[in-house]
Amino acid sequence: MVAVIKRLTTAIVDYVDPALASSVVVSTRDPDNNLRATVPNATSGKFVLAYLPESTNYTVVVAGRDLTTAAVTGVPVSIIAGTTMLNASTSPILLPASASATVAGKVTNASNTPLTDAEVNAQQVLSEG
């Protein structure tokens, strides 16, 4: 027996600054928390996050080394609409330069004894915009 599964025809389409297109990754997570990622077209800056399940709450993240991370929240995707277009090519997502840093070291307790099973987490706060 062969099962046929309908291929979703939904997508989120947008543009990033073509000058940055070759140095960024665009991603989102579907409702099941699976990561979906792509790279923009190096010439036009256009990207397509395709075959996404329906949801009213996608967050599209554009990130690159030494660049400010951009996040577009509340992006709806529906089978009826098909493609959700965020911006035209004349209004691409711009990512200003941003300083980067490296953190290194060890975790110790108050007695300066290394904690070999310690975990460290770094987070980035995104401003609204």
Image (cartoon, rainbow, N blue to C red):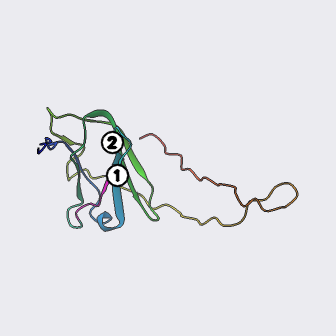
Image quarter (top left, top right, bottom left or bottom right) of the C terminus: top left
Left or right of 94: which side holds 14?
left
The residue tagged 1 is 27
Q: Residues within 10 Å of mark 1 (few under 14, many from 20)?
A: some
Q: Which mark is residue 30?
A: 2
Q: Element under label 2? A: loop
Q: Which residue: 21% across, 46% down?
A: 51
Q: Is residue 113 magenta?
A: no
Give residue 110's position: percent from left, percent from top. Answer: 86, 54
Q: Element under label 1? A: strand
Where does the magenta region start and end? 36-41
Which is more foreground, mark 1 or mark 2? 2
- Amino acid type of the residue tagged 1 in the rendering: Ser
- Quarter assignment of residue 78: top left
Question: Residue furthest toward the right?
Answer: 111
Q: Which residue: 54% across, 50% down?
A: 124
Q: Which residue: 26% across, 60% down?
A: 40
